[in-house]
Amino acid sequence: MNKPVFLRSLFFQFMKISYRWLQQYITISETPEETGQTLTSTGLEVEHIESFETVKGGLKGLVVGEVLTCVKHPNADKLSITTVDVGAGNPSQIVCGAPNVAAGQKVVVALPGTTVYPTKGEPFTIKSAKIRGEQSEGMICSEDEIGLGESHAGIMVLDTSKKNGTLASDFFEIESDYVFEIGLTPNRADAASHIGVARDLKAAKKRSLQFPSVENFKVSNTKLTIPVTVEEPEMCPRFSGVSIANVKIKESPEWLKNRLRSIGLTPINNVVDITNFVCHELGQPLHAYDINEIGGKKIIVKNLPAGTPFVTLDGKERKLTATDLMVCDGEGKGMCMGGIFGGLGSGISEKTKDVFLEGAYWTPSGIRKTALYHGLKTDASFRFERGTDVTQTAYAVKRAAMMIVDLADGEIASELVDIYPVKIENKSIEVKFKNIDRLIGKKIPHEEFFSILERLEIKTSNKTENGFTASVPTYRVDVLLEADIIEEILRIYGFNNIELSENVSADYLASFPEKDITKFKKALGARLAANGFYEILTNSLTNISNKNKLKTGSEAVEILNKLSEEQGILRQTMLFSGLEVCAHNINRKQKDLKLFEFGKVYGKTSGNEGLKNYFEEERLAIYLTGNNETENWQNKTHSVNFYDIAQGVTQILETASIEKTKQEQLSDSVFEYGIKILRGNKEIGRVGKVKNVWVKEFGIKQEVFFADLAMDLLFQSANPKFVVQEVPKFPAVRRDLSLVLDNHVKFAEIETLARTTEQRLIKEIIAFDVYEGEKIQQGKKAYALGFTLQDENKTLTDEEIEKTMTRLMSAFEGKMGAVIRK
């Protein structure tokens, strides 16, 4: 079978996920490397795994020791000779320069071979050495020497009953961790959190997921109830919040600071750290307000007038637009750009005593617009503009509130505010079994993919022999189509579990749109109009005097009950109705005309037993007469010629992506000279100068050029496509050549011979001059040609270029009798 390829989003954002932090929610027995491979296989590509230690070096090689003896160094007044029990049997002799070292102390010892990482300066390695003639087997450490502080006043003296030889990393509870750098694609907003990533591990490894409990959320009192009004529910469908009183703003505990440091965040204080923790835990950004700064003790979510100044937390004043959704106080003062950035005056400070905690769902389009306008990219806007889970705002507020109660000694002082007027339902998607098999390229048992969907929390219902209905949870904002459901099955089942077939092929669910001739005509008309042509519309009924004037191979269709001779027959050609329009405009001083018309021609031919076969054909007619462009000071105008109308026809063929056409010279009852365009053996159309006899019949005294194209053949031959190719890495070169040939030789013949002679290197051939006159032999014509040569794999050498040009000259001389002018 074939391995499927899904393309969703090509740009990604690095997301840091802590290995230890993940283990709070799901059991992980695999190594970080194995876990990274699992995540990558599910589509969360782990770009890098880095180690993290709360203290650089992790205090490796450092142990708790006990100073047994301490005497003055015989050869140095400021040094002491100690013996230290490091739990290794025989005590170690260590020379120490600290003034506070004494027998009986518990100390931190760096053993020989240990690399220590000081708070300032470069790391260094401890060696066994003689110091002033006395052997020293290690170092008794101060806090700055091992990165635990700034003090260098003396050695660290520990208050502990720990056994000698205990690892310093255990004593100081140094935490080591591994951090996954995940290249998160924009569609996977659900994975912008630790629980989001844990969900994928749950589905891939068939394990349970443990969410933090909020069962013990308890309202102590309601003395700080803050009323909330949402004036723009379309842009803020859900707003949750709660008040917490008597908080103590202080430093966060080490475990919380370590969680934030591991993913690159700087701890600030306990309340702010909790909001950041919950954001990266659940993927739900929160905002904390100092209740003392909320004017009128009320919150209103609304738009402020355009131009209103607002100072954000970074100290910059920004002018709001009329569509920026703001969280305002009861006095109408902005406190926060909803879902993006807080204001300078309402945030948490050391003086904060009471906190209002907000968790909301903001419409992604509004967040994206405001963030882009103000040039703001925050953790909150990153998540909201991609789409968060509308169902978890209240849960996240409760989770953070309980942590603030625990770590900031606060009390919940209001009921939970939860404004959610219109519930957002799960998305239902119809899925067919045949499409699962077809798109994946392998038949997966129904029980298996139903199990996968269940582990992904995608519910299934309405199961029949043909398919089922999938109910997608709101946090999966990227799962919108049947193909997305199938991708979810595949990424958990495993791309590597799909066997490759010998023949690579592709499949799709969406049906290709049927060719629409109306849209096709619109595209052709738009191209002509963009080049200065005007569309006309004429009557299919024409003057009976035009009957059978041209040799069309058919007879005219007469109207049985015609109203007048001027509308007595159905037209056999588009020419005469177009000439009528030209004459009408020229007679009214509009002499420079570029016109086109989509219309039908009609006729009848003899059939069996004397019966007539009637037909109608749709045509595209193009008319050119007068000057090429309006006279102006910048460009000198000229009368239209064959090449002008040929260019218009070429543009039509390009728009239809019709290639490999050929031209043949013609002279018929319509054209004085011109060409017919063929694709294979079918004639697409004719282009040329209209014979003077027809022009004069309509009273026109200037040349008219006419193109008559078969719309049916154009439509059938059209192959609209978008071709992408690599920009050439190697330079092209141009060489010019002047040939004298018989005057019947056409440029197309020259081009065909050249491309036959050199098929690989010739990229373009142009004729930049053609001369016939007294300076060359009669019956001859001189062409000045430009050849563009390029090798897509290397730079052409002079020798290769000369060989190519020599081959071309030999071909022209041998097969066309050309004289090369040097």
Image (spheres, rainbow, N blue to C red):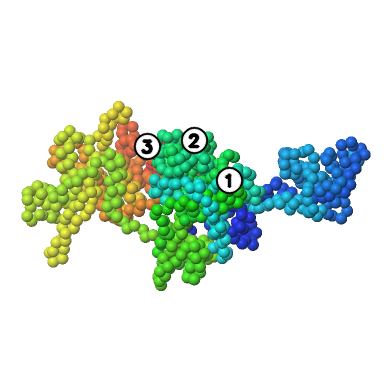
Q: Position of residue 240 (x, y in %)?
A: 47, 51
Residue 311's disc number: 2
Residue 247 is tagged as: 1
**In terms of sequence position, does the residue under pointer 1 or pointer 3 come before the other?**
1
62 relative to 44 in the view: left or right: right
Circle 2 packing at 10 Å, graded few (<14), some (14-19), many (20+), is some
Query: Is 747 rendered above or below residue 169?
Result: above
Q: CA distance from mark 1 to mark 3?
A: 85 Å
Q: Tell me the quarter of the picture where residue 436 sits.
A: bottom left
Say which residue appears at 56% left-offset and 65% top-offset: 206
> Residue 708 placed where, x, y %?
24, 48
Q: Quadrant of the C terminus?
A: top left
Q: Check disc 2 and report its element: helix, strand or loop.
A: strand
Measure how far apart labels 1 and 2 are at the Cα level: 26 Å
Q: State the CA–CA distance, disc 3 to disc 2.
A: 65 Å
- Could you say which is closer to the camera, residue 706 or residue 181? 181
Query: Which amino acid lies under the numbered mark 1 shown in the image of this protein?
Result: Val
